[in-house]
């Protein structure tokens, strides 16, 4: 016990040095409060961005046509396409008549 009392300042300094080195090692290998708060802030920001994107997708889906509406549009498009195919020969004939009339007018001049 006498040795400890005689060398107490050195023992205390050595223990303080060990505590300091231990806390330094712990601070390097484990996350600090600042890092955790920064990571939490970053995670919250990413979560908000994902929520915003999800809201945009949900809004787009809400305004998108339903399956029945798509089928109806397909039928209407098919009907318009068949109407165009039926009118196409008539338009070609009309175009030929216009070309002939134009050619006749140009010959008369």
Image (cartoon, rainbow, N blue to C red):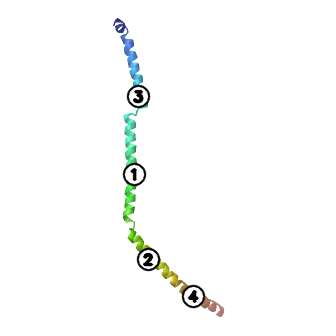
Label number found at residue 76: 2
Q: Which residue is mark 3?
A: 26
Q: Residue at x 42, y 72 (%)?
A: 71
View extreme (bottom): residue: 108
Secondary structure found at label 1: helix
Q: Which residue is mark 1?
A: 50
Quarter of the figure that contains the C terminus: bottom right
State the CA–CA distance, disc 3 to disc 1. 34 Å
Quarter of the figure that contains the N terminus: top left
State the CA–CA distance, disc 2 to disc 4. 26 Å
Q: Residue at x 47, y 77 (%)?
A: 78
Compared to residue 53, the image places residue 13 above or below, namely: above
Looking at the rendering, which quadrant does residue 33 occupy?
top left
Give the image location of residue 105, x and y in percent. Answer: 62, 91
Compared to residue 96, the image places residue 27 above or below, namely: above
Do callouts 1 and 2 mark residues in contact (Cβ within 8 Å)? no
Front residue (pair 61, 109): 61
State the CA–CA distance, disc 2 to disc 3. 71 Å
Classify mark 1: residues with Cα within 10 Å, few (<14), some (14-19) or many (20+).
Answer: few
Do callouts 2 and 3 mark residues in contact (Cβ within 8 Å)? no
Residue 75 horizontal side relative to residue 95, left or right: left
Residue 102 horizontal side relative to residue 70, left or right: right
Front residue (pair 54, 71): 71
Front residue (pair 43, 98): 43
Classify mark 4: residues with Cα within 10 Å, few (<14), some (14-19) or many (20+).
Answer: few
């Amino acid at each position: 016990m006498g040795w400890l009392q005689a060398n107490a300042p050195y023992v205390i300094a050595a223990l303080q040095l060990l505590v300091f080195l231990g806390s330094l090692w712990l601070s390097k290998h484990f996350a600090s409060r600042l890092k955790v708060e920064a990571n939490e802030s970053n995670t919250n920001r990413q979560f908000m961005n994902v929520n915003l994107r999800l809201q945009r997708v949900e809004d787009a889906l809400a305004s998108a046509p339903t399956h029945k509406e798509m089928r109806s549009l397909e039928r209407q498009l098919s009907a318009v396409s068949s109407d165009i195919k039926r009118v196409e020969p008539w338009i070609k004939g009309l175009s030929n008549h216009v070309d002939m009339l134009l050619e006749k007018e140009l010959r008369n001049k």
